[in-house]
Amino acid sequence: MNPELGVYPSVPFSTYTSWDAVNSSRLNKMTNGSPKHFERNLQESSSSLNLGRVYHSLVLTPENFSSEFLLQEKCFGQTAKGDRCKKAGQVVFEGHQFCKTHAPSAYLGSDNSTQIVPVSAWDTAHRMMEATLGFGLAADLLGDTQREIGYVWEEPTSGLVCKGLIDADNVDADAIIDLKSTRGVSPDEFKRSILKYGYHRQAAFYLNGASHRNRPRENFFWVAQESVGPFDCVVYKPTQEMLDDAAQTLFRWLNDIGNCVTNDKWPGFGEYGVIELDLPGWMKPRDEE
C-alpha cells in the first residue's frame, strides 16, 4: 500500500506496517548490512506476539486493548474421544480460541488482528504499564498527548518516501515521547541498547519526519520501562551530539539508497572486492612502556 504524504493520528499498527515506505527499522539494516540487504525488504510482521506491543497498547491506547489482545485460554476444540483439548489456544475463530490442530476448516485467518497473549506475558505487560503510569515523570510526559501518530514524508535529497509511527506527541513539552521496553534501565545498560538497536537514529528519524510534516519538536524523550522485576522506569533524553551524529548517518544512508533506486543497482559486500580483515584492537598486544 502506497500512503499519501501526511499525518495520520491514531493509526492502527497493522495499517502502519502495510504502508510501502522507508522506516527506521528497515534503515537499521544498513548498520551491519549493505544496500543489497536493505533492498531485500523483509516485511514487518503484525501477527507475531511482541511483549512491547502489548505494553504499548496498555499505556498508549487502552481503549483499543480488548479488541487487539486476548488472554490465552485452553483450546475450545474436542479430541477424538470427545474431551476438551488441553492445548493452549493459538488462533481465534468466532470468539473462541483453538490450537492449530483443532482450528475449524472455515478458519481463514480473518481474526488474526486479535492476538492471543500467554498468561505470563499478559501479567508482565500489565505490571509494566502500572510501573510506567505510576512514575510521575513518565505519567506527566504522557498525560496530555496525541498517541500513535503516523507520519509519511518525502526526503528532499534522496526522493525516498519515509514513514514513522510516533508513540506520543506532547505539544506543551515540545517533545516526541518514545516508549521502550527493556530488561535493564540503568544508564549503562540503556546506552548499550541505544547503540545496539539504533534508538538514537530512530529518534533523529522521527524528529526529521515531524519537521517535514510541519510539526517540529525541540525535544525527544525515551520512557525506558523494565520488563522484569523490579519494573523500574526511567526517562532518558539524547544529547544534541548524539542526535547530530545519528542524523549524519541517516543522511548518508538515505542518499545511498536513493542512488540505488535511481540506478537500480543494489551492491552487496562482495562488490567491493577482496576485503582484508585484521584483529580487533582489544586483541592486539599492547606496546610495553
Image (spheres, rainbow, N blue to C red):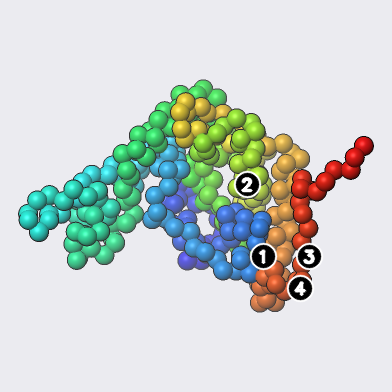
| Of marks 4 and 1, the one in the foreground | 4
- Amino acid under disc 3: Glu
Residue 199 in the image: state x and y as whole percent.
62, 45
Tell me which corner region of the image, top left, top right, bottom left or bottom right, holds residue 229. top left
Q: Is residue 222 visible?
A: yes
Q: Quadrant of the C terminus?
A: top right
Q: Is residue 188 above or below residue 76?
A: above
- Please identify, in this view, whether the residue under mark 3 or under mark 2 is nearer the observer: 3
| Disc 1 element | loop
Viewer-nearest residue: 167 or 193: 193
Element under disc 4:
loop
Give the residue at mark 3.
Answer: 276
Under mark 1, the amino acid is Ser
> In terms of secondary structure, where does tag 2 sit?
helix
Q: Residues within 10 Å of mark 4 (few under 14, many from 20)?
A: few
Q: Quadrant of residue 131?
A: top left
What residue sits right under mark 2 in the picture?
196
User: Which residue is under mark 4?
Assistant: 273
Q: Position of residue 219 (x, y in %)?
A: 66, 36
Picture mark count: 4
Q: Is residue 217 above or below residue 154?
A: above
Distance from the alpha carbon under mark 2 to that under mark 1: 17 Å
